[in-house]
Image (cartoon, rainbow, N blue to C red):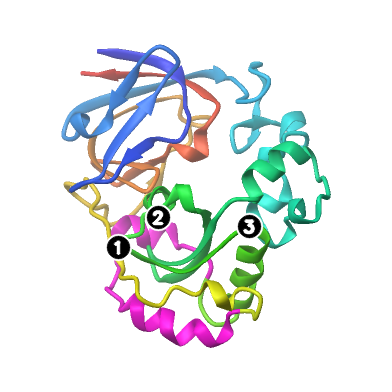
Amino acid sequence: MEYKGVLRKMQTENGSPIQYYLVFENDFIHVNQLLDKHLTIEFSGYECLNCGLNKKIFRQGYCYDCFYEVPQAADWVMKPELSTAHLDKEDRDLEYEKRVQLQPHIVYLANSSNVKVGVTRKTQVPTRWIDQGAHEAIEIVEVPNRYLAGITEVALKDHVGDKTNWRTMLKNEIKDENLVEWRDRLKQYIPEEALPYYLENNTETNLEFPVLQYPTSLKSLNLQKTPSFEGVLKGIKAQYLIFEGNTVFNVRGSEGYVVTISVL
């Protein structure tokens, strides 16, 4: 079977294990069904997720020009504390910014490679945790806008990590943590404006990834350098495909790439 389309991050459905889907314009792949099967990936060009042109992807699936124009790639996306829609101030597109920023947001702890703090829209729970490869996570606060979530994350970053070591995550070199205890210890550092939104009675969520064999070392597949790849799929974790022989492919990091995937 052969599938051709533009890569976007895999869609997910929480379950035991998590279900993954690659969605193209006219087709989709239930990726879990490809485990232990031999695949080929052929890279043939680019398609910017905004303008649709065959222009080299710069970041996040966008060409250089679009990356610096679209609101989806503005600084407040990666740094929620820079959000200004609650002040009625525009960055790139106030209508879009109000739609995204002025809705409930969660500040959470997730254990992917170590315990880290993060921010996501409430509607993206547990999708955000899945995308980060977290095997356990817990909400700390639920606030009404992105700015409050951002300043809470900044305050907590002085006392807990905010980055995932993707190599440790993919090799599954992770120890279980008591996230309820972590949450309770960090309460004292929550900013006063966000403290009324503290969640004190919730429990942690555990996630199960469809992995048959974790890699012991890592070789990252770059389609620009290796436009044709063959391998046996052994697992899916976060937004990575894990192949036999320790090769891993970051689907989200390759958004906007036009590929043909064949199942042999």
Total marks placed: 3
Quadrant position of the N terminus in the picture: top left
Q: Residue at x 55, y 55 (%)?
A: 104
Mark 1 = which residue? 205
Disc 3 to disc 2, C-alpha distance: 19 Å
The front one of 10 and 34 is 10
In primary-sequence order, the first of circles 3 and 2 is 2
Q: For numbered disc 1, what is the local secondary structure?
A: strand
Disc 2 marks which amino acid? Trp
- Nearest-to-viewer mark from 1 and 2: 1
Percent position (x, y) of residue 40?
31, 23
Question: Picture coordinates of residue 125 (x, y %)?
Answer: 41, 52
The numbered disc on residue 145 is: 3
Question: Where are the magenta residues, as a range?
Answer: 162-190
Given residues 160 and 183, the one toward you in this image is 183
Mark pair 1, 2: CA separation: 10 Å
